[in-house]
Structures are given as C-alpha cells and as structure tokens.
Amino acid sequence: MNKIFEAKDINLAGINSSLLEVNIGPQHPSTHGVFRMNAVLDGEVIVSLKPVMGYLHRNHEQIAENMSYAASMPYTDRLDYFNSMSNNLGYALSVEKLAGLEVPERAEYIRVIMAELTRLINHIAVIGFLLNDLGAFFTPVLYAFREREKILDIFEEISGSRMMCNYLRFGGVKRDLSPAILERIRGVVTAFPRFLEEFETLLTKNEILCMRCQNVGVLSPELAVNASITGPLLRASGVNYDIRKVDGYSVYPRFQFKVPLGPKGDVYDRYYVRILEMRESLKILDQALSTIPAGEIMSKKMIPFLKSPRNFKPPVGEAYARVEAPKGELGFYVVSDGTPQPWRYHVRAPSFINLTILEDMCLGQKVADAIIILGSVDIVLGEVDR
Amino acid sequence: MMYFGEGVVKGMMVTLKAFVASYFKGPEDGGLFTVEYPEQRLPEKENFRNFPFLIYDNTPDNLRCVACDICAKECPPKCIYIVREFDKDNKPLKRPAVFNIDHTVCMNCGICEEACPFDAIYMDHNFEIASAERNENLLFRKDKLLKSNEYFHKIRPTDAMAIDERRAAAEAKKKAAEAAAAQKAAAAQAAPKPAALPAEPPKAE
C-alpha cells in the first residue's frame, strides 16, 4: 500500500527541487472537520499522504460502557451527526439482537422510512460539499440544503430535534407517526424527484465537473474489497455489496430496489452512484409509505424499561448488528455481562475505515484533486474519531 | 450529441431560473426559502425539545419533583445535581433543596423527561439562552427551572393534556383505593371480633 510515486515524466533537469511537506488541516474548510492530511509534494504531485485523525476523539465507547444501554442512544446521534437516525437504527438492532427482542411491524416500517430519509439528506449534502471542494462555492450546497431542510423539519416534528434525533428505542420507536406527518413525508417523497432532476441538470453533465472528476482518484475493486471499504465508495468501484440486500435486516427484503454500481470507481462515479441511490431510496420510501401497517410501535416487553432504563439487563452474550448507513457499513458490537451496562461496546465506523484508502487514491494526483478525493470519500469527523 | 459547454449553460439556466423565481414566487414554488430570524420566526414544533424545566401545579411551592434522583442517575452526561431537603428534625422531605442543571453539559436528549416517574421534569422550547457569561448564567438553579403547568400547556398542549388526564385518573384511583381501604377498616372495626381475625389487617395507604 505504501508505494512511492516515481516522477519519471517530470523533467527536473536543472531545477533544484526537493520534496515539500504540506499539512492540509486540521482546520481547513475542505477537510470536513478537524482532520489533517500530511501530504508530501513533488511539485504539485502527491508523493505521500498520511491522514492524521483523532482531534475529535470523545471517548464514545468508554462512555457507553459506563452507562445504561438506553443512555448511549443519544450519544450515537453524535457519531455521524448528519444521519442520526441510521446510527440509532444500528445500535437498536444490535441491542435487540443481544436481548432477543421482537419489533412490531409498524415500528420496523417507521425505522426504514427514517433510515431512507437520512440517506437522502446525507447524499444531497455530500454532493453539495463535494461541489464546494471543487470550487462551486456554495450554490449546489444551498440547493441541497433547501431540500434537506424539509426533511429536517419532519425529523423535528416527530423526534423533537433536527439533527440529534434520539428517536429509536430498543423494541420500537419513541413516538408514532400521525397521518398528517405521513402525508408530509409523502409530499417530500413526491416532490424530491423534481429536485433531483434540477440538481442533475445543474451538475451531472457540467463539463467542469466532468473534467475535474472523471478518472480522478480511481479505486480498483480489488483494493476496495481488500481494504474493507463499504458503502457508495465500494459500489462506485463496481462491487455489488449492499447490506440491505446481503443481510436483509429490518423489513428491507420486502421492498423492491436496485443496487446502483459505478463502472470505474473514480470521483465522478461516486457522485453519480449517490444520485442513483437517492432514486432507489425514493422507491423504498414510496413502497414503505403505501404499505405501512397500523399497530403498536413498541414491543410490549420493552415498555416498562422506557421508564427505568437501568433495569434493562440483556442476558450474558455478545451481538454484532450492522446497517447500511449512508456512508457504509455501520456496525455495533455489544457484549453483555448481565449488568445494566455493556461490558464492551464497539462501533465499526464506515468513514473511519473508508479513510484508510485515502493515500492509495491520492498518489500521483495533484493537490487540488486530493481535496475532491477526500470530499468524495464522504467522512464525518464525529464518526471517524468517535 | 452535446456540444462542449452545453452542460454548463444548462446548469446556468437552472440558477437563472431560481434567481428570477426568488423575486416572483413563494417558497413552495422554488422562490425565496430563507426565514429571516430573529425578525421572522418559524412556528414552534410541539415536540421540539431543548432544555429541561421543572413543573409545578398552581404555586411554585407545589412542585411535583420529589427529589428521587432518578433523572440525575439516568442523565447520560450527568448534568443534573439534586440535594434533598430536610426538615428541622433531620427528616427527609419529598422535595429538592437544590436542583441544578448545567446547560453547558446538557445535551437535550430528553431522557430525564422519559425516566421521571412523577411527571415533574419536561423539555422546554426555550432555545435563546446565549449569554456572555458561562458560569452563573448557564447554570440553571431551581428558581430558574421552575415553570408552571399552564406554561407547559401553552408550549406542548397535546402532551400536557394527556399527562393531566393520566394524573387525574391516577389521583381518582388513589382516592378510590383510600376510600375503599377506609371503608374496609371501618367495616372490620364494626364487625364482631371473631369474623375479623382471619382477615389481613388493612394496609395503611
């Protein structure tokens, strides 16, 4: 993985040049948070690039090991703060697996609806920020945020908070969706394709975007699989691996949707795979909204523990549950020793593992391309550093 | 076949359309979307949660909190600090002497509200708490946290109604149980002694 780029084609005769070390970050708008890229440049070409993380380390796992199971639910919101609902879903699934809980049908549907809405939010925001890194300063981001705001309003109405939702509970969800809110979600889902059309007219065939993104930061499928990359990054390289299909957690097997794949694995494919994934998410949302059953939203077994989370003691054992979060495979590993606190709690964060491949994609590229390659990886530092 | 630059031109048309629409259309049809806070405000969502407050019935002395410490134990970042009040004979009273919530620590998760068995603590809508001083102004003491039930009804009518109904039902049930116990006790006293012997002594409520 650590091959050094040989600048054979560059004619350095007569020029007294040496390698230049540049730190991009930790406080730089293109690093999406406090993240540093230690780049070594030969002229403008990247010879080596080391990601340096840990500036936002908050001891999430240790904190979760020292409190009741339910009390770390709000902390999972703060992992990937763009997609708190999918983080909640991953954690809830792992504890439900540990305790062997059944979730009512309606709650499962609500969870799927929420998870897919977060996918829409994440992908439009990521594309907007990618264009920011490309130099289209804030126009695409604001188009994206206009749509995102509508979904965040729905989240605020049902969970009480726009981003830190804390909405899911073990064995169900916190609050039922009223028919009025379901109607509003349907309104967003029916209006979204129009926005996507507009967004695509703005971007997809834009020559500047194509020239900057095509054949930049190519990730081969072999390397992607070997480095255990997941999510849109992996699918853009042409590997058909979607945990919603592979694992079939929650009620995903009931819905018809495709897994979009990219032909080359460059930055442009990552952009376009995300657009296509949003279209598939809309299909899932459409089906879920039209078939959502009536009924309970909390498993009867868990209702008493809502009032007293400290009395919830899963049996001794371990469980790993994973979800297809918008950024990749988000897994929660929980080990119980029969006490109210988890004995071990581990998060498999997709953006952290997707970052490990950054150097291999950047070698031999220009500095400006390293910025957009990082933008296309889609990281959130809350999740990378935990 | 596209000529070079067509994509850029088409993209510019989108922005031009949005620019024109921003003058003539409403937010629903692609016009201006921005709400100019603080002059304009969005309507408050009922379920919106920001910082907890302590609820009291009628007068501030009559607060529902019994200083059981459950919220302080369940609070994930441990931002609640409670000291129980004692009377002159050092007997614990069912009310807090000190109830502090540190706003710099609180993360507005709403777990205190869910865990409270006495319906005493609820999440507020007040989000404008910015202050130039962070020690005294952002440490909310008991007097600053106390808010009336009417206020709760004003900000969250649906929840408040449901909770009031539940509390009224519980109160009525408790009263009925007390009345039944009193009746039973009276009946046990009135009845001749041999008949009362095998029965359990009435439990004091």
Image (cartoon, coloured by chain):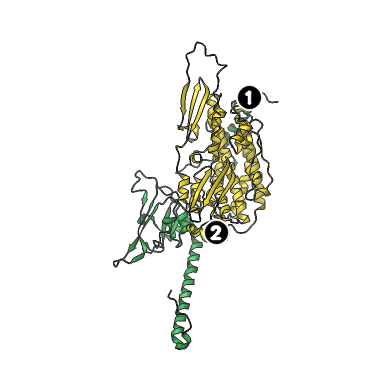
Chain colours: A yellow, B green
Describe the element under mark 2 as helix, strand or loop.
loop
Q: Image quarter for residue A55?
A: top left
B142 relative to A227 in the view: left or right: left
Q: Which residue is mark 1?
A: B5
**Viewer-closest of A112 and A361:** A361
Label 2 resides on the chain identified as A
B148 relative to B17 in the view: left or right: left
**Viewer-closest of B56 and A344:** A344
Q: Image quarter for residue A360?
A: top right
Residue that extends furthest to the top in the rendered view of this protein: A14
Disc 2 marks a residue whose amino acid type is Met
Q: Residue at x 59, y 57 (%)?
A: A297
Q: Is residue A266 above or below residue A183?
A: above
Q: Residue at x 57, y 17 (%)?
A: A8
Disc 2 to disc 1, C-alpha distance: 59 Å
Q: Position of residue A56 (x, y in %)?
A: 45, 39
Q: Which residue is mark 2?
A: A302
Q: Position of residue A299 (x, y in %)?
A: 58, 58
Residue A94 is at least partly visible in this image: yes
Disc 1 marks a residue whose amino acid type is Gly
Residue that extends furthest to the left in the rendered view of this protein: B88
